[in-house]
Image: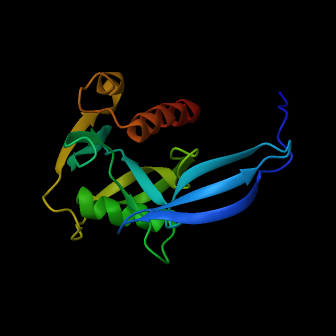
Amino acid sequence: MSQKKHPCPPEIMTCEVVAKSKLFTVESLDLQFSNGVQRQYERVRGGGRGAVMIVPITAENELLLVREYCAGTHDYQLGFPKGLIDPGETPLEAGNRELKEEVGVGAKQFTDLKTLSLAPSYFNAKMHVLVAQQLYVQSLEGDEPEPLVVVKWPLHDWQSLLTQVDFTEARSVAALLLLQQFLASEE
């Protein structure tokens, strides 16, 4: 099915930094669209490095998740291990490092499921969703302020994970559904 695409993005007439913190830079954009309409948008400018989310599967067909504190919701959330890609790292290298830091395992095999955009109307961040298999025990010291709780979840019971009150992060939900599509294609 063919879909009509816009010819080009609107022209950025001006771009001004309106707020800045240690983590974020907020820009105000004055835009002119191809039909002449002008609008002002705001966006959060990311660092451009990208991030990874890893869906680890053990030899016993269990998913490995982490429960960690989330400042945005001021509670603990259950989700897949994740983190930023460090300068010079590939997404697979970052995925293996994050696994070792957050879960205490590495992986011999990775499959890149999809690269997701995170709130593309306001943010230019990308996250690579990876499946990790053939796990082995190896830890690295991470930057978490407290140890993360590792939770094993039976792969065959993946649907009940969706009913967990602390499994609400959209990226983890998307990763779980992408995993099911991947596993179905492997059968």
Using residue 35 as the reference point, say whether residue 42 is left or right of it. left
Q: Is residue 94 above or below residue 82?
A: below
Identify the residue at image location x=67%, y=55%. 30
Which of these two is toward me, 9 or 171? 9
Using residue 122 as the reference point, say whether residue 108 is left or right of it. left
Coloration of the structure image: rainbow
Identify the residue at image location x=83%, y=39%. 5
Residue placed farthest to the bottom in the image? 88
Q: Is residue 177 above or below residue 107?
A: above
Q: Is residue 153 above or below residue 119?
A: above
* Residue 146, position as x, y percentages in the image: 13, 59
| Quadrant position of residue 36 | top right
Residue placed farthest to the left in the image? 146
Which of these two is toward me, 92 or 5? 5
* Residue 176, position as x, y percentages in the image: 42, 35
Counting the numbered discs, the total is 0
* Residue 39, position as x, y percentages in the image: 69, 46
Using residue 33 as the reference point, say whether residue 74 is left or right of it. left
Which of these two is toward me, 146 or 89? 146
- Quadrant (top left, top right, bottom left, bottom right) of the C terminus: top right
Identify the residue at image location x=49%, y=53%. 127
- Quadrant (top left, top right, bottom left, bottom right) of the N terminus: top right
Identify the residue at image location x=31%, y=45%. 58
